[in-house]
Amino acid sequence: MPINTATARWEGNLAEGSGWMKTGRGGLQGNYSFKSRFEEGEGTNPEELIGAAHAGCFSMAFANALSQAGFVPTSVDTIARVKLEKTDAGFAITRIELDTTGNVPGVDEGTFQKIAEDAKANCPVSKLVSPGADIVLTATLAS
């Protein structure tokens, strides 16, 4: 397995500084700042990138699990909402909400939900962030 990398650069102090982050192969790159992380400023932030990683990892894990169960998905779309908040121990990611919709021919609702929960528990990013963050899944079977 390859070792994946990402780089970041920050210049200046926390409130007025800025920086950039990018993935090793150049697929994603974004500027970030205090405002993009703690307010509504333009740019990205670490939590947004964790959300992208989690949505991507879960979508792949879910599609794989569905396929292994004999239900090849047409598509799996996932949104991850990452909650960063100040706790007594400092800032922490406390919750990630995964909202996924799967277009999966031939699967029934119960099987779909069971496979979704299993994928949530077994996706590598879920394993990384849990038990530190509460991971909540809403899975919708497209009709």
Image: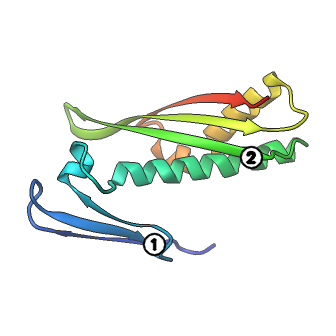
Three-letter amino acid code at the position of disc 2: Ser
- In screen coordinates, is 136 left or right of 18? right
Residue 1's image quarter?
bottom right
Identify which residue, 127 or 84, lies in the foreground.
84
Secondary structure category for the residue under label 2? strand
- In screen coordinates, is 126 left or right of 113? left
Q: Looking at the picture, how far across and down is residue 71, in whole percent?
A: 87, 41
Res 75 label: 2
- Which residue sits furthest top? 110
Residue at position x 91%, y 43% in the image: 70
Q: Is residue 30 above or below residue 73?
A: below
Tag 1 residue: 5
Identify which residue, 109 or 118, lies in the foreground.
109
Q: Looking at the picture, how far across and down is residue 12, in whole percent?
A: 10, 67
Q: Looking at the picture, how far across and down is residue 19, in whole percent?
A: 23, 67
Secondary structure category for the residue under label 1? loop
Decide which of tag 2 and tag 1 comes sooner along the chain.
1
Residue at position x 82%, y 38% in the image: 104
- In screen coordinates, is 6 left or right of 104? left
